[in-house]
Amino acid sequence: MSDTETHLKQNYIGGKWVDSKGGKLHDVINPATEEAASTVVLGTAADVDDAVAAAKEAYKTYSQTTREERLALLGRIVEEYKKRGADLAKSMAAEMGAPVSFAGTAQVGAGIGGFLGTIEALKNFEFSEQHGANKVVYEPIGVVGMITPWNWPLNQIALKVAPALAAGNTMVLKPSEECPGNAVIFAEILDAAGVPPGVFNLVQGDGPTVGNAISAHPGIEMVSFTGSTRAGILVAKAAADTVKRVHQELGGKSPNIVLPDADLAQVLPPTVQGVLVNTGQSCIAPTRILVHKDRKEEAVGVIKAMFDGTQVGDPAQEGGHIGPVVNKAQFEKIQGLIQSAIDEGATLETGGTGLPANVNRGYFIKPTVFSGVTPDMRIAKEEVFGPVATIMEYSSLDEAVDIANDTEYGLSAVVSGDPSKAAEVAPKLRAGMVAVNAWGPGPGAPFGGYKASGNGREGGLFGLKDFMEVKAISGIPA
């Protein structure tokens, strides 16, 4: 048995791999084969207590480190991380179904990107500012609890761990039990990079036990959660009694406003691609494609060709295909949403329910396109989290903006077309991020949303500030 396989059945607390206090073993299912990919321990509240105690002790010294010491540590982590890229990719392919080529580039690369962006922000960060007669200083918060999802697992871990380390905090991480292997390798990376004992702690487990223990723990000053809005509400409620900071990156239902005069063949592929990338399992996937009613047939042609040309296949194989969705529950939810759109009168352009023709098992979804979708349909309201695009029509740009904003979410939005015209539309969209002719924000942009999509921002300077406290000092010489 490899070290990583052994470590999956343990927690990393106080700089050591230790057995859980009363945890149970749990099989992680490979979504392509429906068989066990690995076995992880599901930890307990007692494990969280131990991790918090280690983090509190380590905080006394780590919080006093210099910018230079933290930059050197982050640099060593990046070097160690690069050595494990192939291991990380293989783990994600087996546990959450990201094809190994995509996992080794986009998924692994996103994690490195989170560290590099934080390193840049830390280099020139002003830890103190003079505001009139007052000195305002940025300080670490303390012990940060982190709860991360399975869909872009390394990205979400890095966007919390990197700024927490840069700010001088210590931390307890609970990764998703659907995809825990990459977090174990990540802990091995931090250990190899010389992160001091207790600064970073990993406790495996599920949301109701370990996630809740982190959210409610009186020794944790901040909880940073990425996942569904439903689960984010539970985290906030559990955190309320201890008045800790709650930092959330939650669900989305992103619109893609295609401008009336856009060159569809040019602008649609790079934006609609976001519905297919990672098998549609991205919180910013721009699934609601809004096209002018006079351009609908042309848009359907371009989008249908993209989806028909997308291959579905084994995540263990190299190649440009998409893999399965993460688990049976997600598969059944997506099948139900596809069926609901058919039942409610949307036009199925390609795809539909059932497995793709080339597979006979696994949680694979046919790349699916609907037209004739109206804002009252379930498929237009609920986050699908699969390779399903919905084409909606508008008569005027004002109507397009109204439809785009008619959602409980406000994470991200896309505008496809002339950038100078898109610049006039972007301020009208109630979303934390607006991308023009791309499906996701540019590198270093603050990541986060409005409304039910969460609170706070991740990445770069804004992500660093969100993991810090602000202190005002009055009555001292300027």
Image (tube, rainbow, N blue to C red):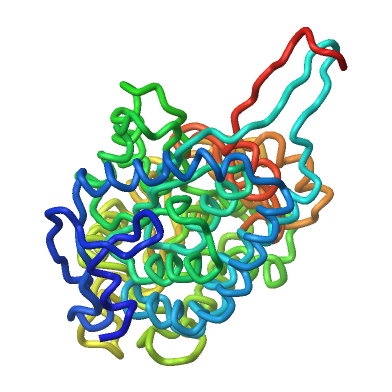
Q: Is residue 413 visible?
A: no
Residue 285 place in picture, x, y as percent: 51, 58
Please determine whether, in this image, residue 426 is positioned above or below residue 74. Answer: above
Q: Is residue 88 visible?
A: yes
Number of numbered markers: 0
Residue name at image x 47 percent, y 91 percent: 318
Residue name at image x 81 percent, y 46 percent: 124
Does residue 399 appear left or right of residue 30 in this picture? right
| Residue at the limit of the structure toward the top, as seen here | 475
Please determine whether, in this image, residue 445 is positioned above or below residue 363. Answer: above
Q: Work out whether residue 184 or residue 416 is closer to the camera in this orientation and state it.
A: 184
Residue 2 place in picture, x, y as percent: 31, 84
Residue 172 place in picture, x, y as percent: 39, 48
Q: Work out whether residue 64 or residue 357 is closer to the camera in this orientation and state it.
A: 64
Q: Work out whether residue 4 or residue 458 is closer to the camera in this orientation and state it.
A: 4
Does residue 251 appear left or right of residue 72 in this picture? left
Where residue 400 sits, quadrant-wise, is top right
Residue name at image x 38 percent, y 54 percent: 14
Q: Work out whether residue 440 or residue 465 is closer to the camera in this orientation and state it.
A: 465
Residue 478 place in picture, x, y as percent: 87, 17
Where residue 236 sits, quadrant-wise, is top left
Residue name at image x 20 percent, y 73 percent: 39
Quadrant into which the N terminus falls: bottom left
